[in-house]
Amino acid sequence: MPKNSKVTQREHSSEHVTESVADLLAHQEPVDYKRSVLNVTGGEGWDKQKEGEEDLDAERPAWNSKLQYILAQIGYSVGLGNVWRFPYLCQKNGGGAYLVPYLVLLIIIGLPLFFLELAVGQRIRRGSIGVWNYICPRLGGIGYASCLVCFFVGLYYNVIIGWSIFYFFKSFQYPLPWSECPLVKNGSVAVVETECERSSATTYFWYRETLDISNSISESGGLNWKMTLCLLVAWSLVGLAMIKGIQSSGKVMYFSSLFPYLVLVCFLVRGLLLRGAVDGIMHMFTPKLDKMLDPQVWREAATQVFFALGLGFGGVIAFSSYNKQDNNCHFDATLVSFINFFTSVLATLVVFAVLGFKANIMNEKCVVENAEKILGYLNTNVLSHDLIPPHVNFSHLTAKDYNEMYRVIMTVKEGHFKELGLDACLLEDELNKSVQGTGLAFIAFTEAMTHFPASPFWSVMFFLMLINLGLGSMIGTMSGITTPIIDTFKVRKEVFTVGCCVFAFLVGLIFVQRSGNYFVTMFDDYSATLPLTVVVILENVAVAWIYGTKKFMQELTEMLGFRPYQFYYYTWKYVSPICMAVLMTASIIQLGVSPPGYSAWIREEAAEKFLFYPTWAMAILISLIILASLPLPLVFILRQFHLVSDGSNALSVTYKKGRMMKDISNLEDNDETRFILSKVPSETPSPMPTHRSYLGPGGNSPLEMSSAPNGRYGSGFLLAGTPESEL
């Protein structure tokens, strides 16, 4: 290279080089710093490496637009929990008062940790395995633990999508099949099914027609073929959405992320027009301020924040790893976090508007049934007509008139009142009946929709919304598995995705046997909570205490073009780790205090009954927790004692063939200046971190010359003495 060239002048100048060197080496093969030398090679080196070029030379896929990426993150974070978990917690933990601890914890735990995951994924441009191998190789087990938890969650989460698919197709009929109890023939007489009569039509349809559930987890009962087919459809949808990576899943997100908002708004408008909707909303948001002093409320709020944003699963890191280096991930973190929060509030409004309507319907039904009892007592002279207020008209009995009559009878017949079997029929009692999860979606909400005009239409919309909410979360969960595995082990994307879905379907058959719902409960309660809490604590510690908060903040400043608020420095370093440690301790105590059991549906009693897990189920339960956490100590031990490579210098990826690095000696002055001094990292997207792959601990290895090829293409240029970049 000529001595007066600009490249040579910069090489011999004392000017500090950081970003330009990173861009220069953007497409070089990552090389162990112990072997880092300046090599000048001929055609022989090129020929030797040309065969592996097709797999190794790559430009990482990117989102087609910022909107597609934001919708993907929203679709992942906004899931079924926003619809059926948040409203229940809000009702249980003080109504409107619950929003205060939730919002506080969202700001001091959720937002900082969500921002942290977005930042490391975008900066290092790897899935969870590659990211944590890079930041702290001894804590590389974080990535593997995330993949295992994603697998466990994906197994049962897709079963819920299968249930929604079943209800979706059953909704195309009028009347809805869960609106009335079925009739069975008893000789020549048709009678109502006993189990349904003793519970309700929607409860019967859920437990008997849908799940055909057994009486306990020990009674397998064989496969439920209807649910098996629905699970196959669910995994087929996930596989088709994931088959091409973000090129296919990104397009799916346009519908799966936006459609639920359309449905929620439609339900809100329709719900507000229903009689009793305001009662439900007022009940929901009436604050019970004393609840704010209860530590249990704060624990449940922290857990909900934690899971609502999808922290620790690896999906957030995977999605952000396809961003450009200069993307404003701080804005993304803030936007997605608060959209998630407002979606939860919107879903709560919808749920309690509909449940307020249902409560009024059920209260009127209670009044009618008890009024008939009172009329019977009046006709048989058990009760005196003098007890009935003169203005009460049994033909048009209101809830207010009934309550007045009920209090008079209770006062006069105080000694024998219980024998009459009269109910108070208070609207407040109906509204206080807490339901969550499948009980809300497949029993309470479906029952309310049977009273809607054009009920099949609303049922189709509701279950299509659940399918899309679940699909968006499943795409993020599966990305938490596929992205790091493809990045690390260089497997073919399509083959691995299909294989993963087929394997998950086969393992998931455990959830579609007649006792499958009990296994769903087990996995939901125990497979993720504790392992994920440990994972996120270690993520926080790895960045803030091992890698260094100051260093990380400086790198964010270089990447974003502005310095993040000092608020993040203190939350990452002190507040979030302490809060997460307290949450982990509370979760362990909760696991120890709460007996490990489940609610079983007893067919003969037509009611739920709490049962303890048998010994073999306890063994599965404990194995789930241990297996999900095992990679953390295992990888640490193996790398601490140098039994395996630390992985920090061997990051690789397999995608479509990207651009080859040009021979710098053939560049014109203008070209080489533009190439070396490029200030926009995204112009030469680097799938590799820039400092650990090239430099030793001191970063001052001497420049050597060799005829042996190195680098991805053997092009002959590798700088070994470059000042270490900040990430």
Image: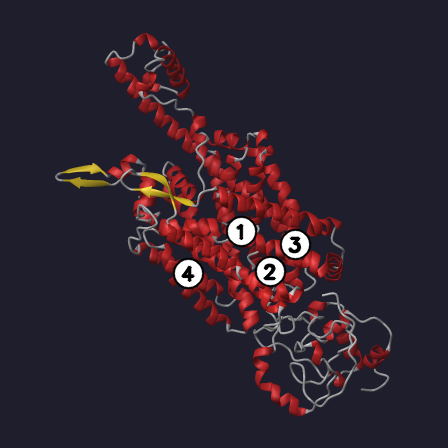
**Quarter assignment of residue 610:** top left
427, above or below 354, in the image? above
Q: Amino acid at mark 1?
A: Leu
First of labels 3, 4 by sequence position: 3
Quadrant where the image shows the N terminus: bottom right
Q: Is residue 150 visible to us here?
A: no
First of labels 1, 3 by sequence position: 3
Q: Give whichever of 243, 713 is nearer the camera.
A: 713
Q: Residue at x 65, y 78 (%)?
A: 29
Residue under circle 3?
Answer: 115
Residue 686 drawn at (x, y percent): 67, 71
First of labels 1, 2 by sequence position: 2
Q: Amino acid at mark 2?
A: Ile
Q: Are marks 1 and 3 in contact (CB under 8 Å)?
A: no
Residue under circle 4?
Answer: 235
Q: Residue furthest left?
A: 188
Disc 4 on helix, strand or loop?
helix
What colour scheme was applied to this rendering of the protein? secondary structure
Residue under circle 1?
Answer: 530
Q: Residue at x 61, y 38 (%)?
A: 101
In this rendering, position of residue 211 left or right of residue 520:
left
Mark pair 4, 1: CA separation: 27 Å
Mark pair 3, 4: CA separation: 31 Å
Q: Give whichever of 383, 637 is nearer the camera.
A: 637
Disc 1 on helix, strand or loop?
helix
